[in-house]
Amino acid sequence: MRQRRARPRLLQAMFDAVRIPDLRRRLLFTLGMLVVFRFVAHVPLPGVDAAALQQLFDRNALLGMLNLFSGGAMRYFSVAAMGVYPYITASIIMMLLTPVIPRLQAISQEGEAGRNKINQITHWLTVPMAGLAGYGQIVLLQREGVLTSAAALPTAAMVVAMIAGTMFLVWLGELITEYGIGNGISIIIFGGIVAGFADMVIRGRLAAMSNLGGLVGYIFIALITIAVIVIFTEAHRRIPVQYARSIFRGGRMYRQSGSTHIPLRVNTAGMIPLIFAMSVVMFPGMIASYFANPAGADPNLANYIVNLLDPRAALPMGLFYWGLFFVLTIAFAFFYTMVIFQQQDLSGALQRQGGFIPGIRPGKHTAGYLNQVIKHITWGGALFLAVVAVMPFFGRQITGVDLQLSSMGMLIVVGVILDTMKQLEAQLVMRRYEGFIK
């Protein structure tokens, strides 16, 4: 026992997790699925000019940012070039349509069977979303001369292959959720982002040769950003709640009261506002890139839009992209938080369970109080997301180091690590072991 306590808490928790057969099997299964994902990410589609593809990514910042989230699969234009993001888009669409369409709302209230139906609809919606996104990428690469063939049959075959790659990754994610550790889809995204860090390290070594001080400053800003993400991800406000219950004992009725709290997260929306904001900001630039003149030709309006919405543009042009990103992140944070909060119906749940907030009358007064509280704390979460969103821009301007470090990527990585640690913590505590979190 003394030898066990002499080890650091985190290392001891890791040893305990590996020592338990069930957890060890789950951890190994998760790692195995990630290895399969990385193999699939390096299976290229036929007819791709590798040199022309590399040049396109070097001069197109939007594609470079999307490549980070696919774990380099888009740079190789593999069957997994789109990752699981068509599924994420379909999930977001279903989440927004469920409270609007009565039929979907009724299905969602059918318990486990309703959730399975919603999940099945989401899977079917992923197929056309993946097809449209894949066809758009193929058209762009054909226009840039990256693909050697523009015939209908090879194009259709590539679209089908990209749809199959996306659905295969979704299937891997669901296997991880069922037999591994953590949320499978998030783990797949996490693996893709972490795989892209190797290229970032190489770029960092090259930057250190010419600007060592700037690189150290950039790393310091990244560490501060990660610390802030951890703080705001775990931050919440506790709303005290009391319950009055009646029990029968010895033929008599007794009234018992208990107290607990509702934890309202400061960042209720998570990373979804960043995904929405980035999609809105990048969409016009991607459409304009289809109509922009090729290199050497006279620029047109589409060229101006592409340059205006370039995340790596120099000042003052770059202020438009990042300023728009900042404002849209705040707007979507409020929008998504309100949607989620209305779906939860906390005031109704409290009233049905016999709970109440001290000093607040049940019903409409409780709903109004909770709405007021969530609006106040959402300002903190929205500003946090907006500041994190533009942090790479300020880091590049301050240090002069141009590393493709995405704020959304950092949010996803930190969030997945915290969520996985909590799940391991729960498994260890159930087996009377000490966990990661003190």
Image (spheres, rainbow, N blue to C red):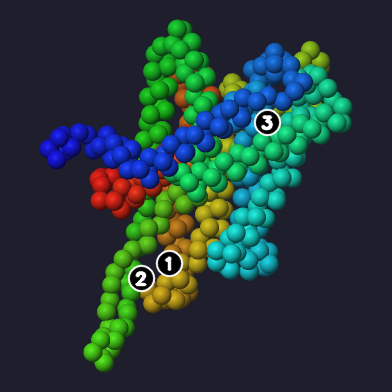
Badge 3, how many Cα within 10 Å: few under 14, some, many 20+? many
Could you tell me how far apart the alpha carbons at marks 2 and 3 are, in whole angstroms?
53 Å
Instruction: State the residue at coordinates (87%, 27%).
Output: 151
The image quadrant of residue 226 is top left
Q: Which residue is mark 3?
A: 79
Q: Which is more toward the observer, 311 or 426?
A: 426
- What's the distance in space between the residues labelled 1 and 3, CA to CA? 50 Å
Task: Check whether the beta carbons of the residues at disc 1 and disc 3 lie within 8 A of each other.
Answer: no
Q: Residue at x 43, y 55 (%)?
A: 376
User: Compared to 123, does 352 lie above or below?
Assistant: below
Question: Answer yes or no: do the residues labelled 1 and 2 have beta carbons within 8 Å?
Answer: yes
Q: Position of residue 10 (x, y in %)?
A: 27, 36
**Disc 2 element:** loop
What amino acid type should be assigned to the residue bearing mark 2?
Answer: Ile
Q: Which mark is residue 369?
A: 1
Mark closest to the chain's N terminus, 1 or 2: 2
In this rendering, the label closer to the viewer, 1 or 3: 3
Q: Secondary structure at mark 1?
A: helix
Residue 357 - label = 2
Mark 1 and mark 2: Cα distance apart in space: 9 Å
- Along the line of sight, which residue is nearer the eye, 69 or 265? 69
Residue 378, compared with residue 250, is above or below; it is above
Q: Sequence order check: which comes first, mark 2 or mark 3?
A: 3
Marks 1, 2: nearer the viewer: 2
Label ID, residue 179 = none
Query: Does residue 287 show up?
Result: no
Task: Tell me: residue 402, above or below residue 18.
Answer: above
Q: Report the amino acid beneath label 3.
A: Val
